[in-house]
Amino acid sequence: MLWIHPLLQFAALLLAVHVLLMGINRFRFQHLKRKCAFNWKRHVLLGKWVAWMWLAGLVLGLYMAVHSWGALGLTGPHYQIGLWMTPFILVGLVTGFILQKPSGKRPAMALTHGAANAIAFVLALYQTWSGVEAVRLLLLD
Ligand code: HEM
Ligand code: HEM
């Protein structure tokens, strides 16, 4: 059971690389006026998967920690940064829901969306690095 959280979050990260690359293409088209393809429906669908996987994985990580060790925060920075991801994931999701139906240009909303998700992505990279340490200390030892 303890392995579900790390595996789920790692899978979400791999999917997030793809979703982020699509988003970067959209950014180049919108703001840098470059010709770039953007599969709107695919980005929205897979983006939702990433956001919900991150949120579900976060809750699962918390649940597993309490269930197994009776305490939160044993992983230190992995726990702290994990909680810090929540507002960025939520802003990315809410703005994504507003943007999902194409209806004219909303560059400021798109920028907010892209920035919130890019920050969540960088934090997820850190979570993977610190998560590997948590796997070594808590699951393998
Ligand atoms: C981790 C997940 C996600 C990442 C990394 C991501 C990243 C990005 C980035 C960088 C952009 C370009 C922003 C810009 O041009 O200023 C973008 C655009 C967009 N995203 Fe996402 N996104 C994610 C999830 C979602 C979700 C969940 C939805 C829908 C519910 C969504 C819908 C959209 C739409 C519709 C656009 C185009 C907006 C426009 O140009 O008007 N994205 N995304
Ligand atoms: C979006 C990414 C992630 C978030 C938001 C997140 C968040 C969390 C949180 C909040 C906890 C509870 C920690 C505590 O109470 O001290 C936790 C536990 C844990 N995390 Fe993560 N984490 C993420 C990714 C990862 C990854 C990629 C790995 C491994 C490579 C990992 C490995 C672990 C392990 C081993 C635990 C102990 C509990 C368990 O195994 O279920 N995490 N995580």
Image (cartoon, helix red, strand yellow):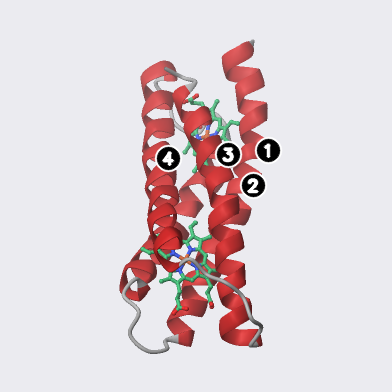
Spatial CA distance of label 4 from label 3 is 11 Å
Residue 129 numbered mark, or none? 1
Labels 2 and 4: the sequence-earlier one: 4
In depth, the one of 79 and 24 nearer the eye is 24
Q: Quadrant for residue 121, please give it.
A: bottom right
Closer to the eye: label 1 or 3: 1
Query: Which structural element holds mark 4?
Result: helix
**Amino acid type of the residue tagged 2 in the rendering:** Leu
Residue at 58% across / 36% down in the picture? 76
In depth, the one of 106 and 86 nearer the eye is 106
**Amino acid type of the residue tagged 4 in the rendering:** Leu
Spatial CA distance of label 2 from label 4 is 14 Å
Residue at 61% across / 69% down in the picture? 24
**Amino acid type of the residue tagged 1 in the rendering:** Trp
Q: Residues within 10 Å of mark 1 (few under 14, many from 20)?
A: few
Q: Tell me if 9 is positioned left or right of 130 in this view.
A: left
Q: Are marks 2 and 1 in contact (CB under 8 Å)?
A: yes
